Image (cartoon, rainbow, N blue to C red):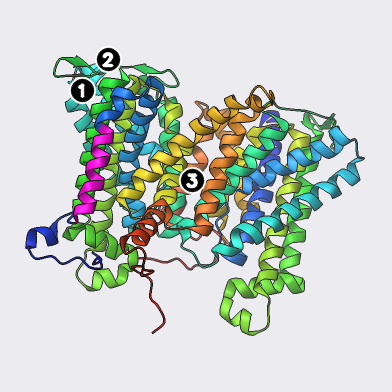
Amino acid sequence: MSLDCGVFHTRYESDMGLRPRPLQRLRLGIFALFALVFPFVASPYWLDLANQVAIATVGAIGLNILVGYTGQISLGQGAFMAIGAYTAGLLTLNFGVPWGASVFAACLVTAAAGAFFGLPSLRLKGLYLAIATLAAQEIVEWGMTHWTAVTGGTEAIVLPAPVLFGVRMNTNFSFYWLAVLTAAGTALFAANLMRSRIGRAFEAVRDQDIAASVIGVDVFRTKLLAFATSSFFVGLAGAMIAFHRNIITWERFTLSTSIVFLAMIIVGGLGSIRGSFLGAALITLLPALITNLGRAIQDTAPQAASILPYAQQAVFGIVIILFLIFEPRGLSKLWENAKNYFHVWPFAYRRGESRAR
Amino acid sequence: MDIFLQLTVSGLSTGMIYALAAAGFVVIYKASDVINFAQGDLLLLGTYLIFFGVAQVGLPWSLGVGVTLLLAVVVALAVERLVLRPLVGEPIISMIMVTIGLSSVLRGVTGALWGPNPRSFDSFLPAGDIALGPVTLSAARVLSIPIALAVLAGLGLFFRHTRDGIAMRAIADDQQAALSMGISIPRVFGVAWGLAAVSAALGGIMLAGIVGVSPNVASIGLRVFPVVILGGLDSIGGAVIGGAVIGLLEVYVGFYVGHGLNLVVPYVVLVLMLMVRPYGLFGKEVIERV
């Protein structure tokens, strides 16, 4: 925990608080108010995007726990989301399990699967682990499309819409509340987890695993726990995708999904909850923005429509590269810089910058 | 038996193209420790450049190949200088993500320029069949095997005998010692990317002759991983053997077992290999353990 300049804690409660400063609470309040009012004023198109952002935030926080906080690279995000989505969907469809219970079961199953695929992390580090998770992704993807008896192969699975308090969650408006509350709950849980002994053990393993084991962290157990915790939320995101559209198709859980989620946490900021949200928002909204831009210039440049998907792909790549080169700590750091600038404005002191003498 | 021979030739020719892609991957990894996820896209670039040169501009084949190689090297050098150089010393996740971003850019640009549809054109590889005793084999596939082997052998000789090749091995061995001996690391990184581009572009040129030009070529980039893990991340010879084994395994499993298992069997091999010998058949036995 870094200390803020000019902030004095006089009570333990404020010292322990997640957002102790009045300004932090004000910003949170404004954001919460915005989230409350948004669905009443937004068009269905934007509401759908907001739901996608909320789901992506859950998945990105899950991935960030593993990659950003514990330093274990995973290219298997898509596979874990698939496990969550298919478990939740098939339990509800084939066994009539209520959707809430099947989503929870999906999270647990994905957590178990995550811990299983985390086993190689005992032996493998860095790029070898990345390649191992790549293989896991390909194998799960193959199972998804070829194990026809269970997953229905390449056919889509259609689910009943979830019902909450007698309301069918089949519109983006009703699903919005569910998605936003889940995302907020996930963020709160993750923020608190990272302040606990377990979260600090995650970070210790990331920074220097041998030193971590010297100070009494069981490295292997911690890694497995990170895989399981991360996969729990990734599975939750997968299950939410299934119930958002009430349909499960394998195309949503390919290697490109893994890459998109990695891009979210890179662009947002590794090891940052706020970054997970910002990255999820940017990467989800970017294709939509480019599409809108393409539509806007369609009249003057008719060929724009045909290259639109390629423009999206190229811009996606360029955004990743630019962030890695110019701001490796992502949007989260940019936000911090802006905040620090105004914190003691008009003086030029900035937290975290050491100055000569 | 006839079918077996046909499968073998087709598996070997695919395997040699894997090997060309993998060799480029190995060269980059050896010199600069970068895991290049964009290797398949360099291959893709090669197929589209030769298509552009020969079919669209109308260059003769020899000139087309030369221009393709030249452009591929220019692209690779630009990538190395602009994208990879600023990230030297960054954590591995940054390296992986930057090449993934690069792959996305290359795919987007080639897609925007040449569209999603597969194209075909008259290849320099002979189109007919070769009758070899009782079996007929596609001449293009048969010919691609010695060509690829020659290129790979050339790459191997380069490492063994040229100044830059030896410098590259020195850097792979100990970067600081190499620096203190006056080896220019930026130059060697540039040479490594140039070589990787040449190797991938040659693979792409042959692929254009065998299966035609389409965006699907980039998917070979992922097949590189089973190949290099099998052969060893830092061994050109390993890339050849690994490429041959994975190529053959795919066609045999695809024909004799079926069920689309050929799509997944390279990755099963990869996982088994990581469990037993993570450094591969011919790789240096150094792996960080926890």
Vertical position of residue A169 compared to residue B263: above or below: above
Disc 1 marks which residue?
A: A99
Amino acid type, residue under disc 3 in the picture: Val
Amino acid type, residue under disc 2 in the picture: Pro
Residues at marks 2 and 1, CA–CA distance in whole angstroms? 9 Å
Disc 2 marks which residue?
A: A160
Direction from residue B268 to residue B190 in the image, left or right: right
Q: Position of residue B202 (x, y in %)?
A: 76, 47
Vertical position of residue A40 compared to residue B125: above or below: above
Q: Chain of mark 2?
A: A
Residue A25 part of the magenta-drawn span: yes
Disc 3 marks which residue?
A: B269
Name the chief secondary structure element in magenta: helix
Residue under the image location 28 percent in, 26 percent down: A176
Image quadrant where one finds the N terminus of chain B: top right
Q: Which residues are magenta?
A: A21-35
Q: Are marks 2 and 1 in contact (CB under 8 Å)?
A: yes
Amino acid type, residue under disc 1 in the picture: Trp
Direction from residue B91 to residue B207 in the image, left or right: right
Direction from residue B120 to residue A256 in the image, left or right: left
Q: Are marks 3 and 2 in contact (CB under 8 Å)?
A: no
Give the mark toward the camera: 3 or 1: 1
